[in-house]
Amino acid sequence: MAEHPIENLMKTAMENIKDMIDVNTIVGDPVETPDGSVIMPVSRVSCGFAAGGADYQTNGDSRTEENSLPFGGGSGGGVSVRPVGFLVVGQNTVRLLPVDGNPVAERLIDIAPDLLERLQSMMQQKRSDASCPESPLV
């Protein structure tokens, strides 16, 4: 069975969309800062595609040589790229700096583990100081 014209239409549109989007669209090229950190932009990519067509008949029988009706169709597609944030890698840490959202809340979440460690060490220091009696002054 011969290929229907809509198959070629869809194949061409999909190949063009594939050429527009690659991995560098989602995770951008890394940039190295003077302090040695590496910053990579991260984006959200959405794409859509539609195709349609119909065999049609004009006045009288207008069949082609292959005994099929003439075809009319079209296709369309779109790509949306939205920045999400920046991935910062450096000094034994990896952080995601979002473009949207509440930066204060994000920063609090980032420093929470370090803050808990410091509080824990302070509490242990206080306990060890309380368990050792001080020597009397002579």
Image (cartoon, rainbow, N blue to C red):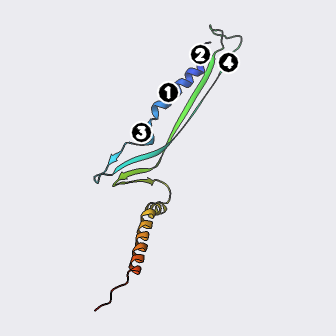
Provide residue 119's location: percent of width, then percent of height.
43, 70
Depth check, front residue: 113 or 44: 113
> Where 111 falls versus 33 (above or below)?
below
Q: Position of residue 120 (x, y in %)?
A: 43, 69
- Say if mark 4 contacts mark 2, CB within 8 Å: no
First in sequence: mark 3 vs mark 1: 1
Residue 62: % across, % down? 67, 11
Q: Quadrant of residue 125?
A: bottom left
CA separation in Å, label 4 and label 2:
17 Å
| Residue that carries the numbered disc 1 in the rendered image | 15
Residue situated in front as seen by the camera: 39 or 124: 124
Nearer mark to the viewer, of 4 and 3: 3
| Residue 11 coordinates in the image, percent (x, y) | 54, 24
The alpha-carbon separation of the residues under discs 2 and 1 comes to 17 Å
**Disc 2 target residue:** 3
The amino acid type of the residue labelled 2 equals Glu
Cα gap from disc 4 to disc 1, whole angstroms: 27 Å
